[in-house]
């Protein structure tokens, strides 16, 4: 039937399931490898792989795996019981030491533009996909081990990952999810018991670091670069197969019946543009800087993917990038992310153009991306400021207010997260005119967020007060009770984010064998919008010692 062509029946493992091997009870349906062309060469030799979407590969054996952390929410997504997560088999499977018979481990082929230049074939150099689980609700989740050894795509690197970058990936994936930002998820973090040599700052000072593996979980890991590689090779046959596959599997809403056609491809690209615009708005809302927005690190699902030298904005500085590898050009700085995403989408459009033969609809979607991003940004900032939607001339005023705030926030180092949180505390109930409100009350949200302690210069004070009075006037016009405004603002302005130095403190402890802070951070970040008594230490400004410490503000791609 037509239906079975679109959605092949789920293969249920016929193996006996017993309580002692609960992982075996999972339902695998490895559609990616079943439907897309495989690399016929089964050797794990580094090379260019032509005419295929993936190569089969087996994870390396690790010496002595141990569990650092497991995210119970992700285990639940997979229908894994708590006992399953605590089992020896869990450790074996998610360290790569045991491959379940229902799995089909493979590395995918993709290319990408890195820092603006075409880089050719990249691929899963240190990620091995284990297969796809279909859970009890019919959701498809692909499992991927990051750092499980070399693949055909490892080029000159080792295919491994170290604890510090794995802690960062694990915690940030989950923190982003709980913040409401689309992201790949992280099930588990294990130490391999092996040592890995890394030159953290590429400065000739390599050191042995503990090896680790994160199991990432996502509906799919398909990237912009997954399509670029086949365009670069003019392999339109495989390009179309992958496109059809991605649409059928991850965008089934786009096809009512039968096969995707050229129009479906346009709709798909439009959807990728929309999701990407929404994603970047979220990043701007929470102060997240991805750090390496190469086209191989952008998901067609609009998920945050590949947590490398990312960072969280401390003082509000649109020019900031955490990535030392990008320190010079700062291509991937905070304030540039929307433009870079647009550039990346244009590369994806170029990769599709020969298949669709008509570029106007693609160009239209790119235009719509900008409009959607700008609208989304405006609405998001209004929400952060606690402004009710306004029509007419107020809308232009709101735009000015938002624009001018960015200037004011840059007059001196101001902690973005603390500022927006404190802004919701400004008392306005019963205030007829902001002229009545004391300067000290208006300046308070800034004062708590400043990094310097010396008094403001007269100019800065005037500029800041003048913005606050305009803001207060605007808030007065909404005639909304303080507690209602505060409650709304606190749903979009987190109090807890994965501050760079907090992640580093957790890493420092973990490297010494104490993983409690990873667990504690994960727990605090589960409810990033709620004040948590006793957890005030996680909602503080970055301490001075962390200003220039490696890992706290400076990161590299070495991971
Ligand atoms: P990234 O910019 O970190 O997303 O990585 C770009 C490319 O380099 C991808 O193809 C990765 O798989 C690959 N890569 C990064 N680190 C390693 C590693 N340690 N071993 C093998 N491949 C790697
Ligand atoms: Mg990557």
Image (cartoon, rainbow, N blue to C red):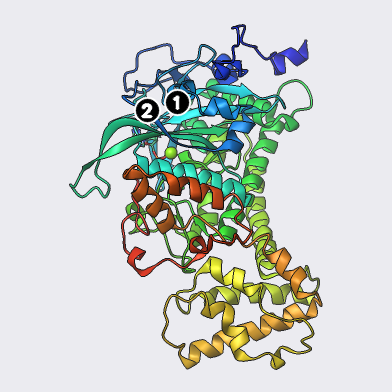
Q: Which residue is drawn at 18% across and 47% down?
A: 205
Numbered tag placed on residue 252 in the rendering: none
Q: Distance between the residues labelled 2 and 1?
A: 7 Å
Secondary structure found at label 1 = helix
Q: Residue at x 34, y 38 (%)?
A: 162
Taking depth in this image into account, of 451 and 47 the one nearest to the observer is: 451
Q: Mark 2 points at which residue?
A: 65
Quadrant of the rendered image holding ligand 2: top left
Numbered tag placed on residue 91 in the rendering: 1
Q: In this view, does 162 lie above or below 440?
A: above
Q: Which of marks 2 and 1 is nearer the N terminus?
A: 2
Q: In which quarter of the image is residue 107?
A: top left
Q: Is residue 307 visible?
A: no
Q: Are marks 2 and 1 in contact (CB under 8 Å)?
A: yes
Taking depth in this image into account, of 554 and 278 the one nearest to the observer is: 554
Give neighbour class at mark 2: few <14, some 14-19, many 20+ (Cα, 10 Å): many
Taking depth in this image into account, of 419 and 458 the one nearest to the observer is: 419
Q: Is residue 391 above or below residue 180?
A: below
Q: Where is residue 217 in the image (x, y as percent from the top left)?
A: 55, 33
């Amino acid at each position: 039937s037509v239906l079975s062509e679109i959605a092949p029946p789920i293969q249920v493992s016929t193996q006996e399931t017993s309580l002692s091997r609960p992982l075996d009870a999972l339902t695998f349906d490895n559609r990616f490898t079943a439907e897309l062309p495989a690399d016929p060469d089964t050797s794990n030799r580094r090379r260019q792989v032509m005419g295929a979407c993936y190569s089969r590969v087996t994870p390396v054996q690790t010496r002595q795996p141990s569990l650092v952390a497991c995210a119970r929410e992700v285990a639940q997504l997979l229908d894994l019981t708590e006992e399953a997560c605590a089992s020896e088999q869990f450790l074996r499977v998610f360290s790569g030491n045991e491959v379940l018979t229902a799995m089909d481990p493979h590395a995918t082929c993709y290319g990408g533009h890195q820092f603006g230049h075409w880089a050719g074939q990249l691929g899963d150099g240190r990620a091995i996909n284990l297969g796809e689980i279909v859970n009890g609700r019919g959701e498809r989740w692909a499992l991927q081990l990051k750092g499980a050894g070399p693949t055909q795509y490892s080029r000159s690197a080792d295919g491994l990952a170290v604890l510090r970058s794995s802690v960062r990936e694990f915690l940030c994936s989950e923190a982003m999810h709980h913040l409401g930002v689309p992201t790949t998820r992280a099930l588990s973090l294990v130490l391999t018991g092996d040592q890995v040599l890394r030159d953290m700052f590429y400065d000739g000072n390599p050191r042995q670091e503990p090896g680790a593996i994160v199991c990432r979980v996502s509906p799919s890991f398909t990237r912009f670069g997954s399509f670029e590689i086949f365009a670069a090779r003019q392999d339109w046959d495989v390009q179309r197969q992958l496109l059809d596959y991605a649409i059928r599997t991850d965008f089934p809403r786009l096809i009512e019946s039968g096969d995707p056609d050229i129009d479906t491809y346009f709709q798909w690209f439009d959807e990728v543009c929309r999701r990407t615009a929404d994603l970047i708005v979220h990043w701007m809302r929470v102060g997240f800087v991805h750090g390496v927005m190469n086209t191989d690190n952008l998901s067609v699902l609009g998920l945050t993917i590949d947590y490398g030298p990312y960072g969280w904005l401390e003082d509000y500085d649109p020019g900031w990038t955490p990535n030392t590898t990008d320190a010079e050009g700062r291509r991937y700085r905070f304030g540039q992310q929307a433009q870079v995403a647009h550039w990346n989408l244009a590369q994806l459009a170029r990769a599709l153009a020969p298949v669709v033969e008509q570029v106007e609809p693609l160009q239209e979607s790119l235009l719509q991306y900008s409009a959607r991003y700008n609208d989304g940004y405006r609405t998001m900032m209004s929400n952060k400021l606690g402004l009710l939607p306004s029509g007419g001339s107020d809308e232009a005023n709101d735009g000015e207010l938002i624009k001018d705030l960015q200037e004011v926030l840059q007059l001196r180092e101001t902690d973005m997260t603390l500022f927006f949180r404190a802004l919701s505390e400004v008392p306005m109930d019963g205030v007829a005119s902001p002229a009545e409100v004391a300067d000290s009350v208006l300046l308070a949200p800034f004062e708590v967020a400043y990094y310097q302690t010396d008094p403001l210069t007269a100019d800065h004070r005037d500029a800041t007060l003048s913005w606050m009075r305009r803001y207060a006037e605007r808030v007065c016009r909404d005639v909304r009770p303080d507690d209602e405004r505060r409650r709304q603002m606190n749903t979009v302005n987190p109090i807890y984010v994965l501050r760079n130095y907090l992640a580093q403190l957790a890493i420092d402890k973990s490297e010494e064998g104490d993983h409690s802070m990873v667990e504690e951070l994960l727990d605090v970040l589960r409810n990033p919008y709620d004040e948590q008594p006793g957890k005030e230490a996680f909602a503080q400004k970055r301490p001075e010692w962390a200003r220039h410490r490696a890992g706290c503000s400076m990161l590299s791609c070495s991971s």
